[in-house]
């Protein structure tokens, strides 16, 4: 059985197929309401989550399947010292597919190596979050009508933000995509991503510390929060957390058809006053997450 640990494991054709199926689910939900009847999804969340966990659970219920699992490490046997491998081997007897979030990079890969059922990486540390990236791609396609020929600005924590790393990797495979990387000096995109993705593929990108300067050219603005849980030093977090706050005033120079995205949760990096702006796509983005996860669950369970 196939798992999904990294977005790069999916070809562009496969991503496009998932987007097509997700759009069909949105248009014809009744057609899919029993596609996974009798199947069980295990949600193993060793790290807190609201949207991702509930989105997976809602997706499985909407396909007619069932869900079991836990929402924090303390409520699982890992609190007693059980290894990820042993937990996964056990859960493999109870479920047909696993969605797993873990604070340690690589844990979902270890999980996939220790079970015969599909494992979906629902986020591993600062590393990968492939279903958030699929959600982002579906949102871009639905809002802009395309995933190519786009200038995308990613703003905030580009160093630790796993959603940003996955999105850059995925968008780099589409034609004529330009990246504008907006962050404080301390939170710039890691060198390895620049070298192995942006420069290796000869992609156009610019780095800037100014959101205002970048705004007029953007088709997509992807905001991220500065993540307290990734910092070793509370003083550094406090100093950087309010670096970029999107307000209606900052949007005055933006395109009329700008698409504002955010993987959520937000803290204060987007003013609630922006929520009323028709260009604010982040809650539609949340909704899209359920449908792309439905498409992915069906694909990995080989449900037609």
Image: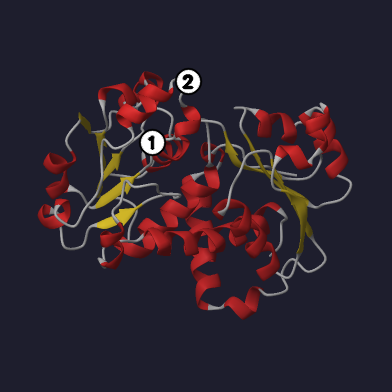
Q: Name the residue under label 1.
A: 226
Q: How crowded is mark 2: few (under 14 residues within 10 Å), some or many (20 or more)?
A: few
Q: Which colour scheme is used?
A: secondary structure
Q: In this view, does 86 lie to the left or right of 245?
A: right
Q: Is mark 1 on a helix, strand or loop?
A: loop
Query: Which residue: 69% across, 47% down?
Result: 71
Where residue 231 sits, quadrant-wise, is top left
User: In the displayed structure, does residue 201 sit left or right of residue 32?
Assistant: left
Q: Quadrant of residue 139?
A: bottom left
Neighbor class of circle 1 (other Cα within 10 Å; few <14, some 14-19, many 20+) is: many
Q: Where is residue 164 in the image (x, y as percent from the top left)?
A: 40, 38
At 50% from the left and 48% from the top, the residue drawn is 132
> Can residue 199 be seen in the rendering of this structure?
yes
- Image quadrant where one finds the C terminus: bottom right
| Identity of the residue drawn at 12% across and 49% down | 216
Residue 114 visible in the shown view: no
Dot 2 or dot 1: first in sequence order is 1
Residue 279 placed where, x, y %?
Answer: 26, 63
Q: From the top left corner, tell me how far across and down residue 104 is, in percent.
A: 62, 27
Q: Is mark 2 on a helix, strand or loop?
A: loop
Give how far across and how far down residue 110 sits, in percent.
72, 29
Task: Please state, as top left, top right, bottom left or bottom right, where the N terminus lies in the image.
Answer: top right
The residue closer to the viewer here, 29 or 185, is: 185
Q: How far apart are marks 2 and 1 (CA)?
A: 13 Å
Q: Which of 149 and 65 is in front in this view?
A: 65
Give the residue at mark 2: 232
């Amino acid at each position: 059985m196939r798992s999904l640990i990294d977005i790069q494991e999916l070809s562009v054709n496969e991503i496009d197929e998932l987007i097509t199926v997700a759009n069909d689910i949105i248009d014809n939900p009744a057609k899919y309401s029993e596609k996974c009847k009798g199947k069980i999804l295990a949600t193993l969340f060793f790290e807190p989550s609201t949207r991702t966990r509930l989105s997976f659970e809602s997706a499985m219920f909407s396909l007619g399947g069932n869900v079991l699992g836990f929402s924090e490490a303390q409520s699982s046997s890992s609190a007693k010292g059980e290894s990820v491998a042993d937990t996964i081997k056990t859960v493999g007897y109870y479920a047909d597919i696993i969605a797993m979030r873990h604070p340690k990079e690589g844990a979902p890969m270890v999980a996939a190596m220790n079970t015969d059922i599909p494992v979906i990486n629902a986020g591993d540390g600062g590393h990968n979050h492939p279903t958030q990236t699929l959600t982002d791609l579906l949102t871009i396609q639905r809002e802009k009508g395309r995933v190519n020929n786009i200038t995308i600005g990613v703003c905030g924590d580009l160093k630790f933000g796993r959603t940003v790393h996955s999105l850059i990797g995925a968008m780099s495979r589409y034609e004529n995509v330009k990246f504008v990387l907006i962050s404080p000096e301390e939170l710039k995109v890691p060198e390895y991503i620049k070298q192995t993705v942006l420069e290796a593929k000869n992609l156009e990108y610019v780095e800037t510390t100014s959101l205002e300067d970048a705004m007029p050219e953007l088709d997509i603005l992807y905001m991220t929060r500065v993540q307290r849980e990734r910092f070793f030093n509370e003083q550094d977090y406090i100093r950087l957390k309010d670096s970029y706050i999107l307000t209606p005033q900052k949007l005055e120079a933006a395109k009329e058809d700008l698409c504002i995205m955010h993987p959520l949760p937000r803290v204060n990096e987007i003013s609630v006053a922006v929520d009323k702006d028709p260009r604010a796509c982040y809650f539609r983005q949340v909704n899209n997450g359920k449908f792309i996860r439905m498409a992915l669950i069906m694909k990995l369970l080989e449900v037609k």
